[in-house]
Image (tube, rainbow, N blue to C red):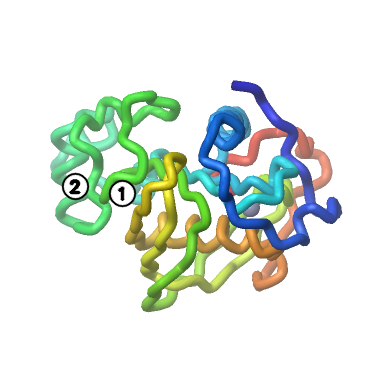
Amino acid sequence: MALRAIVTDGDEVLRKKSKQVRNFGERTRLLLDDMWETMREADGVGLAAPQVGVLRRAVIIDVTEPWREEHESVPRAGDESVGADGDGADVRAESSASVSDLPLPAASDALSRSAPDLPVNAPGGVLYELLNPEIVASEGELCEREGCLSVPGVSGLVKRPERVTVKAVDRNGVEVQVEGSGILAKALCHEIDHLNGVLFTDIADEITRAEATSGADEPQAGAS
Ligand SMILES: [Zn+2]
């Protein structure tokens, strides 16, 4: 695997429509492996192939950390262990009570970022690797703040569906269907927009820019 450079706003590659992936061989595997390494280095939630300069319809998503933050941010009264050391049983109890459609994978101590043994494209999982993804159904609406690794230091409020169903194929060309809500729905929509040359700043309100003093090279946690 190798790190690839993340292209930033102003590069015309981000404005082009990506082509369908038709090659499920070594070249596509290499692209995807490089994208994982690049996204993790940048501490991102998602990455689309055009962000590394490749105009192919390929996206990856890792909602591990935002998922934890969303669901551990309000510990229940009297529950000392939630958020203390990431104890698996308590995290699961918390999650199943609040959001039933995004359960944590069984082994929650494997939740640290870059854990190699988490399943990809599993129902209710946190890692997704999708080729030729298409939104086939959506419902509801959420308006939340987003950022993008290709637009460093900028965030804005974007309206997205609360829940989406995406059809795609995996790296072996096998059809997969992903249902996502909340952070996963947002990431799916954001990454698929990249494949169509759309940046979140095109559709965002209340766009804010970080002060110029915070270096643009800093990883931007939570961006995609
Ligand atoms: Zn992005």
Q: Quadrant of the N terminus?
A: top right
Quadrant of residue 109 within the rendered picture? top left
State the SS at label 1.
helix
Relative to 206, is 160 on the left or the right?
left
Give the residue number, with chain letter if any, for mark 1: 71
Crowding near the residue tagged with mark 2, few <14, some 14–19, many ≥20 C-alpha atoms within 10 Å: some
Residue 21: x, y in percent?
58, 50
Q: Earlier in the sequence, mark 2 or mark 1?
A: 1
Please tell me which residue is depicted at 66% across the width and 72% down the height of the picture: 203
140 lies above or below 180 = below
Q: Residue furthest top?
A: 1
Determine which of the numbered discs, if any, sits on residue 58 in the image: none
Contact check, label 2 and label 1, Cβ < 8 Å? yes
Determine which of the numbered discs, if any, sits on residue 94 in the image: 2
Residue 170: x, y in percent?
42, 45
Please tell me which residue is depicted at 33% across the width and 61% down the height of the picture: 179
Relative to 85, is 112 on the left or the right?
right
Crowding near the residue tagged with mark 1, few <14, some 14–19, many ≥20 C-alpha atoms within 10 Å: some
Q: Nearer the viewer, residue 119 or 222?
A: 119
Residue 114: x, y in percent?
44, 26
Q: Nearer the viewer, residue 86 or 28?
A: 28
Q: Amino acid at mark 1?
A: His
